[in-house]
């Protein structure tokens, strides 16, 4: 137990030490050169990329554990993400850019409202793209070992972008985590999905709105977006609904008495599953494969729900009809981690013990609830953790 308590302190000390050792940082960068060369990066490009990088960025190190979509209650996150101001700006941009959005939708099959929701969430419709050096941010995260080799590989992708002449070190700027431009793509996503929709010879997600919006659509199609189907919908369940039967085709849910709260019909095709992000006492959603395509952009359930709901509001849909259980007890990150460990011990969970609620934990909770004869809403609560811990004693 003492070792577990010391681990966060040792991590912070290591990160602080990394920031205070520029010589070690330079040596780490030089050790990256063979991998960059294998990617086709020239020595001239490599040296130019790091010429104005003095060392790790302390501001980036301070941000590593602060990601709001994973730490706040979903209803708090949605209140900030799907604000009246953002909805109004999204609708204004829909009118302003109707021709461009229609052309992108015709090409990729992604609705204009969804593209606008991503654009609004990621960069406030192009107004907040970030001013951090992408190369320095990624090098800082990579040297610190944050998330394994992910950021090292993203740094190598950034060097590839520079080698191809698609950006310069001065223009390759973005967020603290290396996300770039109006789309907030990581470099690998840029290489894979960015498009030159305005046909000026550049895939410009920094200053070209058509390129940025079309690149979002390209990313979603590559992630499995299915044209003609919604991301999901808020629904109302009939009395006595069997929550253990939480997967199936949209028409099957309709046949079982599930209705959309806005009065429109459920899709006639496509697979869906129930999603109760606040438990049985909060709003209920049917989510489809397009919800998972949104999660490919950001793995947070709260983020995906915010994008989907913002898209609906921009398109004219009403606010959610069911209230959130804002006063109900909820698990903090340590509690979620304990629940993950307890469910794993019972053979229900096989994901990381990271204290983050997501699809793997939701499925594990449902399996435990079904086995225990509980309503299978998939929602992690303090009561569920206490029951699990009591069963282990």
Image: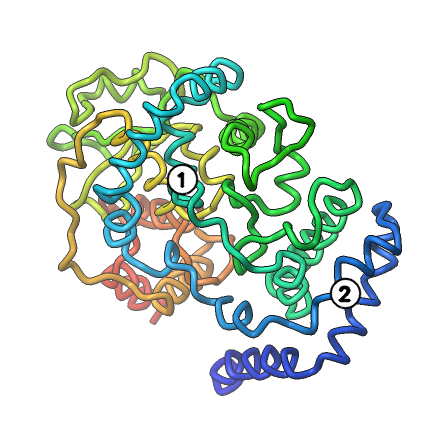
Q: Nearer the viewer, residue 197 or 237?
A: 197
- As drawn, is 83 to the left or to the right of 392? left
| Mark 2 surroundings: few (<14), some (14-19) or many (≥20) residues within 10 A | few
Q: Nearer the viewer, residue 70 or 167?
A: 167
In x, y percent, where is residue 123? 44, 45
Among the two numbered marks 1 and 2 on one chain, the one whose residue lies closer to the N terminus: 2
Q: In the image, is residue 16 above or below residue 264?
A: below
Q: Residue 68 occupies which quadrant of the picture?
A: bottom left
How many marks do you count on the picture?
A: 2
- Name the residue located 55 percent from the left edge and 53 percent from the top edge: 174
Q: Is residue 247 visible?
A: no
- Secondary structure category for the residue under label 1: loop
Q: Which mark is residue 51?
A: 2
- As drawn, is 268 to the left or to the right of 30? left
Looking at the rendered image, the quarter that the C terminus falls into is bottom left
In x, y percent, where is residue 259? 18, 23
Q: Residue furthest left?
A: 239
- Name the residue located 42 percent from the left edge and 62 percent from the top edge: 355
Q: In the image, is residue 191 above or below residue 98?
A: below
- Name the residue located 32 percent from the left edge and 33 percent from the top edge: 90
Q: Which mark is residue 125?
A: 1
Q: Residue 340 occupies which quadrant of the picture?
A: bottom left
- As drawn, is 347 to the left or to the right of 384? right
- Secondary structure category for the residue under label 2: loop
Q: Is residue 332 visible?
A: yes
Q: Residue 211 occupies which quadrant of the picture?
A: top right
């Amino acid at each position: 137990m003492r070792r577990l308590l010391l681990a966060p302190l040792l991590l912070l000390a290591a990160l602080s030490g990394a920031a205070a050792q520029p010589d070690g940082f330079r040596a780490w960068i030089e050790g990256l050169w063979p991998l960059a060369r294998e990617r086709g990066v020239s020595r001239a490009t490599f040296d130019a990329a790091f010429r104005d990088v003095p060392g790790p960025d302390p501001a980036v190190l301070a941000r590593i554990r602060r990601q709001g979509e994973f730490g706040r209650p979903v209803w708090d996150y949605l209140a900030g993400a799907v604000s009246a101001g953002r909805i109004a700006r999204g609708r204004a941009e829909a009118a302003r850019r109707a021709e461009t959005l229609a052309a992108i939708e015709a090409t990729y099959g992604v609705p204009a409202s969804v593209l606008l929701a991503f654009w609004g969430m990621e960069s406030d419709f192009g107004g907040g793209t970030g001013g951090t050096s992408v190369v320095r941010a990624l090098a800082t995260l990579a040297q610190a070992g944050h998330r394994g080799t992910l950021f090292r590989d993203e740094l190598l992708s950034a060097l590839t972008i520079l080698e191809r002449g698609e950006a310069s070190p001065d223009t390759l700027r973005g967020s603290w985590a290396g996300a770039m431009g109006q789309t907030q793509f990581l470099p690998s996503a840029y290489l894979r999905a960015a498009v030159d929709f305005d046909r000026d010879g550049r895939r410009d997600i920094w200053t070209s709105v058509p390129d940025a919006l079309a690149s979002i659509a390209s990313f979603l199609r590559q992630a499995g977006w299915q044209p003609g189907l919604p991301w999901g919908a808020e629904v109302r369940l009939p009395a006595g609904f069997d929550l253990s039967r939480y997967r199936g085709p949209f028409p099957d849910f309709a046949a079982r008495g599930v209705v959309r709260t806005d009065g429109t019909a459920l899709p006639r095709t496509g697979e869906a599953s129930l999603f109760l992000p606040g438990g049985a006492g909060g709003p209920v959603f049917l989510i489809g494969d397009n919800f998972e395509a949104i999660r490919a952009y950001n793995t947070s359930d709260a983020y995906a729900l915010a994008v989907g709901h913002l898209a609906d509001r921009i398109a004219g849909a009403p606010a959610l009809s069911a209230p959130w259980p804002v006063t109900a007890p909820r698990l903090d990150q340590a509690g979620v981690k304990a629940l993950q460990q307890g469910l794993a011990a019972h053979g229900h969970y096989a994901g990381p013990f990271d204290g983050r609620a997501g699809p793997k934990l939701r499925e594990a909770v449902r399996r435990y609830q079904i086995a225990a004869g509980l309503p299978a809403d998939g929602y992690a609560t303090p009561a569920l953790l206490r029951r699990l811990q009591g069963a282990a004693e």
